[in-house]
Each structure stands twice: as structure tokens, then as C-alpha cells.
Image (spheres, grey):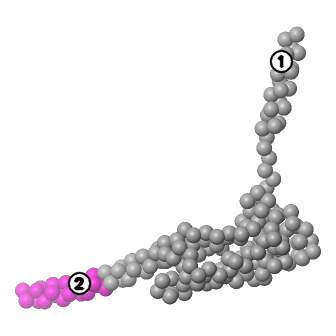
Amino acid sequence: MDIIAILSSISLTILTAFYVWLTFKLSKTNSIMLEEQLRPYVVAKVYIKGVTLYFELENIGKRPAYNVSVKVIPEFDLMIQKDFDYRQLLTQKYMFPGFSIKNVLTYSMWYFELKDKNPEINEYRIELTYFDINNRKYSEAVDINLDQLIIGESPAEYDNTHYLKNISESLDIIKVSYKK
């Protein structure tokens, strides 16, 4: 009978140790997941709206980002027009959650004129570095091909209402002439 009690005691001790180890691992994993969910997360976007090409920074995280630094390789200098200066976006001291700042880079029709003179202006890499409130450093990078963005994302937009109006007017004329 003592052997059964000793084996039960040993197996319960091993099982308890395994349970403690597993609980510790789960707690550590939950802590990492919570930290990732609550961190700042700054993204850089280059997008088209209408015929305008924009550069935007946005903190989509749940905490503020500090000392945001952006490096564009190569710089957008060849592409930008004299009236547009994106450099004000390259350093931000503080970006609260949901904060977004954008600036016009160029217009898509100017981009193609510039590209004819400088074929290398279509490939860019944007590197971001920023810190959280505990001074933990984060880095992100995105590669952008402007040809794909401009050609792929901005198909010609057609409004067919004028066609429908012309067809409707033509049908009315046919109805009137048919009734005569």
C-alpha cells in the first residue's frame, strides 16, 4: 500500500510541476501578446486619390509613438514638385494613437513626365524608426513600386450616367416618332 501512495505522490508532484511550467509559459506568451497589442505602430503609406500622389504617416497602434524618424531611399526629391515638400513628415516628436499626417508628393501625370527623364524614380524603400513610452525602439520598412501603384491602383474612372441619359433621350425620341 505504501508503494501506491509513494507512486501517486510522485506522479502528482510531476503533474503539478508540469502544470506550473505550462502556466508560466502561457503567462509569458500572454504578456508578449498584450505588449504587441498595446504598442505604437507607425505605418508609411504612399497612395493615389484622384490624380494626386500622397505620402502619409499614421500611428495605427494603441500607444503614442515618440521620436519618429523616416528615411526614404532614394529620396523623393526627383519626384516632388517645387510647391510640395514632404520633409516635414520625416521627423515627428510625438504621434498619438490614430494621428495621421500627409502631404502631396506629385500628380500622377507629372510623375510619368518625370519618369521619362529619370527611369529610376519608381522604386523606393521607406524605413521607419520610433520609440514607445518606455524608450523601446521599433523599426518598420516598406518597399514601394510607384509604377504598380499608379497604373494598378488608379484605373480610369468612368461615369456612365451621361451615356444612360443619352440613351434615354434617344429612346424617348424613338417612342415619339414610332407613335406618329
What is the magenta range?
1-22
- Image quarter of the C terminus: top right
**Residue under label 2:** 16
Query: Residue 175 — which label?
Result: 1
Residue 57 position in % (x across, y down): 64, 72
Task: Between residue 86 and residue 170, name the one nearer to us.
Answer: 86
Identity of the residue drawn at 70% across and 83% down: 71
Mark 1 element type: helix
- Image quarter of the N terminus: bottom left
Identity of the residue drawn at 68% across and 80% down: 90
* Mark 2, other Cα within 10 Å: few <14 / some 14–19 / many ≥20: few
Q: Is residue 94 magenta?
A: no
- Spatial CA distance of label 1 from label 2 is 89 Å
The answer to whether residue 117 is seen in the rendering is yes
- Please say if the residues under marks 1 and 2 sit with CB atoms less than 8 Å apart: no
* Mark 1, other Cα within 10 Å: few <14 / some 14–19 / many ≥20: few
Q: What secondary structure predominates along the stretch shown in magenta?
A: helix
| Viewer-side label of 1, 2 | 1
Identity of the residue drawn at 79% across and 40% down: 160
